[in-house]
Amino acid sequence: MEIEKSVYAWGERYPAPAKLNLMLRIVGRREDGYHLLQTVFQFVTWSDWLTFWPHDANDVVLEEGISGVAQADNLIVRAANLLKQETGYVGGARIRLEKNLPMGGGLGGGSSDAATTLVVLNQLWALNLPQEKLMSLALSLGADVPVFVFGKAAWAEGVGEKLSEIILSEQWVVIIKPDCHVNTGEIFSAKELTRDSKTITIDEFNAGQANNDCLDVVCKHYEAIEKALCDLNVFSEARLTGTGACVFALFDSEELAIEAALTLKDKWQTYLTKSCNKSPLFS
């Protein structure tokens, strides 16, 4: 999947959408400590936004940045510099980030920002790397980055990089962001974490096997997440995305989703959006 080159332009805003993990199973562990997963990714229309301008100097500048994150450590800057390093490109870019997605929410905001940077600068800089190469570069930035370059709802295995397109129903979504930041490393290193779940098939997932193996450990460590799940579960089946902190529920109608969001908004940071099988970046 490629964006038409004609739609790329300096100074335009490009979305970096959030993702949801509709299921997450931990089926093993590699010798290097990385966990082997089965998961299902779907995008939502809620996004960060990035704007790119040419820059005369041979460097990448991120305007304003994110508080507490050094420029060199920001995934956007790292992604742009990785493209330069890989291709030998001489030139730069000035990038503005409009940050809407909460950090540490399990929505993949930083990973999506990096992927949008790879995809857009690949064209603006006329590098013309194929999608497979961009996905390989994406994996070196983080396990969640490749799916945003892939651009389609996906059944994922390995550490999350083995992706196959999957067609899912597109529904209204209510997302709650509890006032806590989950330490993903802490969750994945917890002794009580299930690491030997049986692998399942897509048919079994479609039949209702949509558990998240991190859920019990996360709720044990973060009471606010457990409370958010309980409150949201009143309206529709509430789930944890990734290791959280965000929880979400899917709704068949906009009216039911709005009712839930309005009821919960005084108690929680609540967001109303819609799931989509094609990344807004590629729409």
Image (tube, helix red, strand yellow):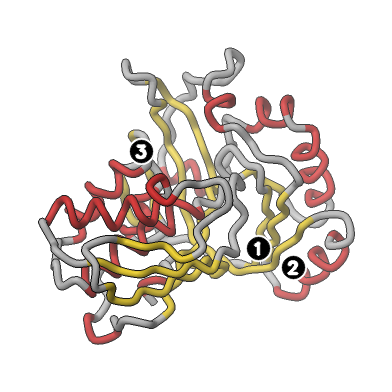
Mark 2 surroundings: few (<14), some (14-19) or many (≥20) residues within 10 A: many
Of the two numbered discs 3 and 2 on the same chain, state the one appearing first in sequence. Answer: 3
Picture residue at 69% right of the left edge, 57% below the top: 175
Residue behind mark 1: 173
- Using the image, determine if residue 54 lies above or below residue 42: below
Residue where numbered disc 2 is placed: 257
212 or 199, nearer to the observer: 212
Instruction: Say which label, 1 or 2, has the lower sequence index.
Output: 1
Residue type pointed to by label 2: Ala
Question: Does residue 168 appear left or right of residue 178 in this picture?
Answer: left
Marks 1,2: beta carbons within 8 A: yes
Q: Secondary structure at mark 1?
A: strand
Q: Determine the secondary structure under disc 3.
A: strand
Look at the numbered disc 2 and give the secondary structure of its residue.
helix
Residue 137 visible in the shown view: yes
Label 3, on which residue?
157
Residue 50, given in percent of the width and then of the height, sits at 44, 70
Q: Residue at the spot x=10%, y=56% of the render?
A: 88
Q: Relative to residue 51, is residue 250 depicted above or below?
A: above
Residue occupying the far left of the picture? 88
**Badge 3, how many Cα within 10 Å: few under 14, some, many 20+?**
many
Q: Is residue 10 above or below residue 257?
A: below
Task: Tell me how many marks there are.
Answer: 3
